[in-house]
Amino acid sequence: MPRQDSNRLTARGLRGKLWIAFVLQTLSIALATLLGVYAAMVVLRDVLIQRALTDEATHYWKGRSEHPDWPVPNTYNMHGYLLGPNADEATVPAALRGLPPGFHALTMNGADELVYVDQRANEQLWLIFHQEQLRNLALWFGLVPLSFVLGAVYLVSFYTYRVSKRAVSPIIQLAQSVRALDPHKPDLQALEEIRRSSSSDEEVQMLAESIEGFARRNESFVERERNFTRDASHELRTPLTIIKIATDVMLSETEPSPLAEKTLYRIKRATRDMEALIEAFLILARESDVGLPSETFLVNELVIGEVERAADLVSGKPVEVKLVEGATLNLDGPSRVFVVMLSNLLRNAAQYTDKGEILVSIGEDYVQVEDTGCGMSSEDAAHAFDLFYRGQQSGRGGHGVGLTIVKRLSDRFGWPVSIDSELGRGTRARIQLPKATIVFSP
């Protein structure tokens, strides 16, 4: 398998999904941790500390009411100022003066402070909490432990990723080996190595064993197909060739009665139809294009040959087969496939045309067969390519197989076929040749 395909399988397969899951998990944990620490700081500042300052102020006023000389709070994390009616305002820092009651965030002496202002009667209290201590607490009791926890989580996640990667590696190797298998000549050595590998889990070994067995059965089926197509090609064509030669000899060396001559021509047409069907079935029986040489052929030469053979199909009927060459085309592909498709369309046209003409046209990118036969209704035309479908004109013979063969071949080799028909006026069938090259166009 090419290196590019292998890399694409790894990037978009199980390993890629595991890596994406690991990265998303890591980012999610980091984001959740940061949000958690931030939320904790907000709760600590806006709820706990503010509540503590409020309680501290209430406690101070209560103590002062009982003892007028109750000292203003002054601790490591907090200190306060009190301004009474006869006190000097200069004892209070200028940044605090004029602040209304409530909480305020200020920067004093290069530090962030949380200030709570409370006023009772003619006295005002300022309580200042040093937020630097809050940040230190959050750092040492929040971020540092969480960093260790995050590190442990990341290590466990990475270990889980590595274990998962090793667990799915045999599956990825198995997928790459299956992709590289040639269905016609499968190399099962890689599957055998995976199946016997000690690093493969029991499920992987079972899967490899099942795929190996399927590949071996498929190889036998392919070999059986080759033998069938080879034997059928020889054994079925030989008696048809004998019948065709015998019919030509009888027509040329004897003077049969009109009824006998008509019968011989019917035998000849039936033999030719059988040859075309056998050719089509053998092509469709092959799983791939093996045995169908691709070549550059002149479309016009094959069309002329089929038009000449189509004259035998309408012998005895007032029908004329015409050819209009609007362009000379070259086409790359199996010429036998094109002949089978065109001959089926011509046989179909001859079968349903009692008078008038069958016009074969070669355009710049198509070959078209148009007749003046009985045509089809819109419903029959919609089902024309369905297997064994027989419409209103089913009494004319046929088994509903010819157009199905044409459709299957067109889908397989990229030559789209379409049918346009009108009941009582005729049918137009077109084989589109998108990759044809124009040799000459008048």
Image (cartoon, rainbow, N blue to C red):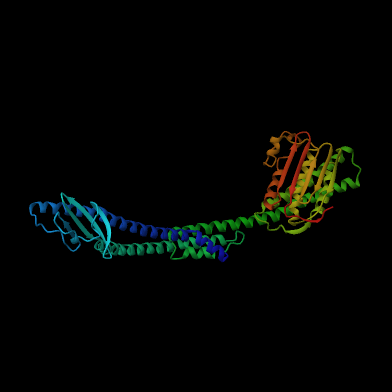
Whether residue 345 appears in this view of the structure is: yes
Q: Quadrant of residue 29?
A: bottom left
Position of residue 378 in the picture relative to residue 146 (left or right) = right
Position of residue 219 in the picture relative to residue 354 (left or right) = left
Q: Nearer the viewer, residue 138 or 280?
A: 138
Please give the name of the residue rendered at 38% of the width and 64% of the height, measured from the top-left corner. Answer: 159
Q: Nearer the viewer, residue 103 or 41?
A: 103
Please give the name of the residue rendered at 12% of the width and 51% of the height, measured from the top-left corner. Answer: 62
Q: Quadrant of residue 294?
A: bottom right
Residue 165: percent from left, percent from top = 43, 63
Please give the name of the residue rendered at 18% of the width and 64% of the height, measured from the top-left corner. Answer: 76
Whether residue 402 appears in this view of the structure is: no
Q: Quadrant of residue 355?
A: top right
Number of marks present in the image shown: 0
Residue 248: percent from left, percent from top = 86, 48
Q: Nearer the viewer, residue 18 or 90?
A: 90
Q: Nearer the viewer, residue 67 or 394?
A: 67
Position of residue 123 in the picture relative to residue 388 (left or right) = left
Is 318 above or below relative to 272? above
